[in-house]
Image (tube, rainbow, N blue to C red):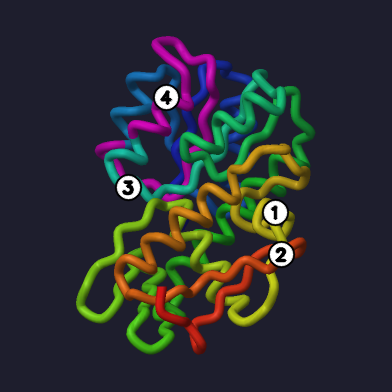
Amino acid sequence: MTQVLIVEDDPVSSRVFERTARDLGGEPTTAATYDRGLELATTGSFDLIVIDRMLPGGDGVDAIAKLRLAGSNALILVVSALGRSANKIEGLEKGADDYLAKPFDPEELRARMQSLMRRVTIQTSDNDLIAFGDLEIRRKARTVHFGIDHVPVTPKEFDLLCFFAINADATVTRMQLLENVWNLHFDPQTNVVDVHVGRLRRKLEEASGRSYIQTSRGAGYMFLPQIAVSA
C-alpha cells in the first residue's frame, strides 16, 4: 500500500487529499503545520508527499529542499494557491515532482496523484535492474553504478536517467521530458531541462569516461549507451 503524507492546514483540502489517496489505494497520514510535516517526512517512510506552500511555520517548498538535501526519494506533489508559472518553476527546481494550483478540479487532483502513485509502483516492481554494459540502474534502490563505482544522482536526475534508459537510442524532446519527468504539460520557458540534463551528462562522463547523452540539435536528446564515445 502506498504511504501518503499530506501536509495541509486547510481542513477541507486535507479531507479531499485523504479521500483521494484512499480511493487510489493509498494510506494517508496528515499534518497541519510546516514543522510537523517536516518531522513526519524525515522520520517516516512515505512514498508520496502532498504538500501546501503557505503553511503555519513556513513555506512547503523550503521543506522539499531540506528533504532532498537529506536524501529523500519520496515523490512530492505541491498543491498551492501560489499558482503562477514562476511559483511552479520554483517548486519544481527545489525538488517537487508535480505542482497543482488551487483551486483545483478534483478529477485533475486524482489524475495527478494517480500518476505519481503509478510511478511508485513502477519503482518498486520486480523489474528492478536496467543495465547497459557496466552502467547499472537499480529502480528499487534508486541507485546508479558504473562498474563498482556509485554515481551520485539527485532524485530528479534519477527519474531523468530512467526515462532516457527506457527510450534508449531514440530522440527524446524537451517537451517529452517536461511531461514525463516533471509532469508539466506546458513549456515553462526556462532551461530547467537543459540544466538537469547537463548535470546528469557530466556525472555519467566523470564516472565512465564516456558520453552517453548526445544533443540532437533542434530536436532534443538521445541516450546512446551502446555507442557511447570517449568524453
Specify whether 165 is left or right of 16.
left
Q: Secondary structure at mark 1?
A: helix
Q: Which residue is mark 2?
A: 217
Q: 173 or 219: which is nearer to us? A: 219
Q: In 3D space, how far apart are the residues under numbered discs 4 and 3 (Cα atoms)?
A: 19 Å
- Counting from the top left corner in percent of width and height, residue 152 is at 30, 58
Closer to us: mark 2 or mark 4?
2
CB under 8 Å between discs 1 and 3: no
Q: In 3D space, how far apart are the residues under numbered discs 1 and 4 (Cα atoms)?
A: 24 Å
Q: Is residue 186 visible?
A: yes
Q: Which residue is mark 4?
A: 62
Q: Which residues are magenta?
A: 42-66
Specify whether 137 is left or right of 119.
left
CB under 8 Å between discs 1 and 4: no
Q: Which residue is mark 3?
A: 45
Crowding at dot 3, Cα within 10 Å, few <14 / some 14-19 / many 20+, comes out as some
Q: Secondary structure at mark 4?
A: helix
Q: Quadrant of residue 15?
A: top right
